[in-house]
Image (tube, rainbow, N blue to C red):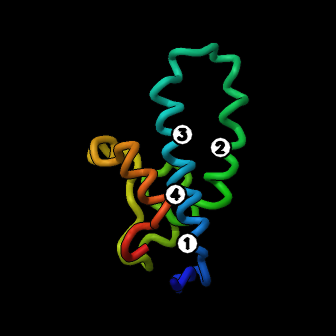
Amino acid sequence: MNTHVTNPIGKFHLGALRYCVLLFATIVYGVAFAGQHDPKSSGVTRPGKTIFHNFCSVCHGDKGDGRSRARNGLNPPPRDYTSSEAAIELTRDRMIQSVTHGRPGT
């Protein structure tokens, strides 16, 4: 299986894409349960934010909204994880499938 995809930024390993999707899933579930813990424990999310910034934001934007500098050169365009459609479509199973097997065209 070809694990490299050519894009405007250069070689991008699909493992990093899978990692980004898994990280995003972790962040989504973390936000969903954020009200159930002490706000002072927010340091737990710092590593996730750093990983998203370092590996995912180049395509998905700093806010996960798909508005990165690279978006115009990517086909398909990066997903807007902040949309209501993404919240409905990105089930736990879908995220696991994406991380495990990748997404077509990405």
Q: Residues within 10 Å of mark 1 (few under 14, many from 20)?
A: some
- The answer to whether marks 3 and 4 mark residues whose Cβ atoms lie closer than 8 Å is no
- The residue under label 2 is 48
Q: With 97 as the anchor, is 2 left or right in this view?
A: right
**Disc 1/disc 3 C-alpha distance (Å):** 20 Å
Locate the C terminus by quadrant.
Answer: bottom left
Q: Which residue is mark 4?
A: 61
Asked if disc 1 and disc 4 are in contact, CB closer than 8 Å, the reply is no
SS type, badge 4: loop
- Residue 63 position, x and y percent, is 51, 48
- Between marks 3 and 2, how big is the CA–CA gap? 7 Å
Report x, y in % for residue 60.
Answer: 49, 59
- Front-lying residue, 103 or 100: 100
| Spot occupied by residue 104 in the image (x, y as percentages of width and height) | 37, 73
- Of the two numbered discs 2 and 1 on the same chain, state the one appearing first in sequence: 1
Q: Picture coordinates of residue 6 (x, y %)? A: 53, 86
Amino acid marked by disc 4: Gly
Look at label 1 and name its amino acid: Leu
